[in-house]
Image: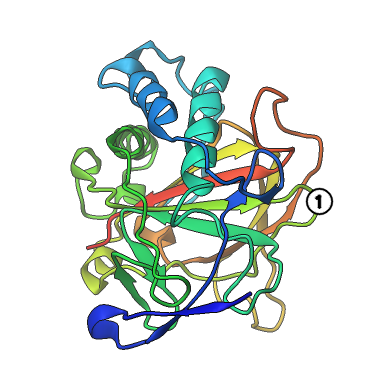
Amino acid sequence: SGAASGSAGDRGLGTFTECPSYDVSSGSAAPVPAPEPGPSLAALDAALAQGAFARWPRPRKVELAMPGLVILREFVPEAAQVVIAQAAAALGAGEGGFPAADAEGCSMRCRTMHLGQSWNPRLRDFEPRRSHLDNAPAPALPPALQRLARECAALAAAGDAACAGVRDPASMAADVCECSFFEAGRGGTAPHQSTCEAPSALRDGAPLVTVSVGATAELEVFDGDPKAAGARPRLFRLASGDVLVMGGPARQLFHGIRRVLPRTGPRSLPLNGGRLSVCMRDQR
């Protein structure tokens, strides 16, 4: 891929990489022009409107998997999954969306788009534009997803108060959203800690709220250092519509996606058989 000269403002990084966006619905570089996200975002706002959650069935099971780690089984209805996937696909195919390749032009096992603020792995900081790649602005974070995060955090805290940390789940800002797309059969992430946020958020144990949409993923969670001798993970399967809440004592546990199981998601989703992870958290 080529490079374009530019200014990263006060970052002083200077050069940006041309980076086409990726269309998760087709599994290829996004068409030009990219799909218009407006209708998809309107549908998302309607589906996740204030009060809509009261009409949803309760989770099939509130699984207290580990202290501070709760899984709301089958909470997000399939109709809502469809509009979440449609909105993510439209945003992901546009400017600042899912990158078709990494900064070195290599193919990726997991593509990530940030809404609200972009994460810069080189500077280890959030910023309005992803200056480490193409300087594209982060797409706006739909308020509907923030409402969903607060609802899920409150439901999980009702089952295990520890997962909210010391914060009121109803006041969760959810001002950063990380959308990750995994291709079926090949996507995965190494065990890692989610520690990008400000020290205050980590100290308070402010929860991560992750909505799974699409193919089933196998999550591994370590209660300690995964590189330690004899370390063994706890394994959990996350199906489409499940919501994972990690906070309090579980907030900084090492975790990763071991594999994504092909042909396991609803056929109604425009994800080409893959998995979408929508992870919301407080930046501060």
Give the percent coordinates (x, y) of residue 7: 32, 81
Q: Residues within 10 Å of mark 1 (few under 14, many from 20)?
A: some
> Which residue shows up at 63% across the image and 60% down it?
100
Whether residue 41 is situated above or below residue 92 in the rendered picture:
above
> Which residue shows up at 64% across the image and 31% down it?
270
Whether residue 89 is situated above or below residue 235 in the rendered picture:
above
> Which residue shows up at 57% across the image and 60% down it?
20
The foreground one among 282 and 65 is 282
Quick check: 42 left or right of 170?
A: right
Residue 208 visible in the current orientation? no
Give the percent coordinates (x, y) of residue 176: 33, 54
Q: Is mark 1 on a helix, strand or loop?
A: loop
Quick check: 113 left or right of 53?
A: right
Quick check: 177 left or right of 63?
A: left
Q: Quadrant of the image for the N terminus?
A: bottom right
Give the percent coordinates (x, y) of residue 94: 48, 48
* Residue to which mark 1 is pinned: 185
Whether residue 203 is situated above or below residue 215 in the rendered picture:
below
Residue 110 visible in the current orientation? yes
Q: Quadrant of the image for the C terminus?
A: bottom left
Rendered image quadrant of residue 130: bottom left
The foreground one among 184 and 249 is 184
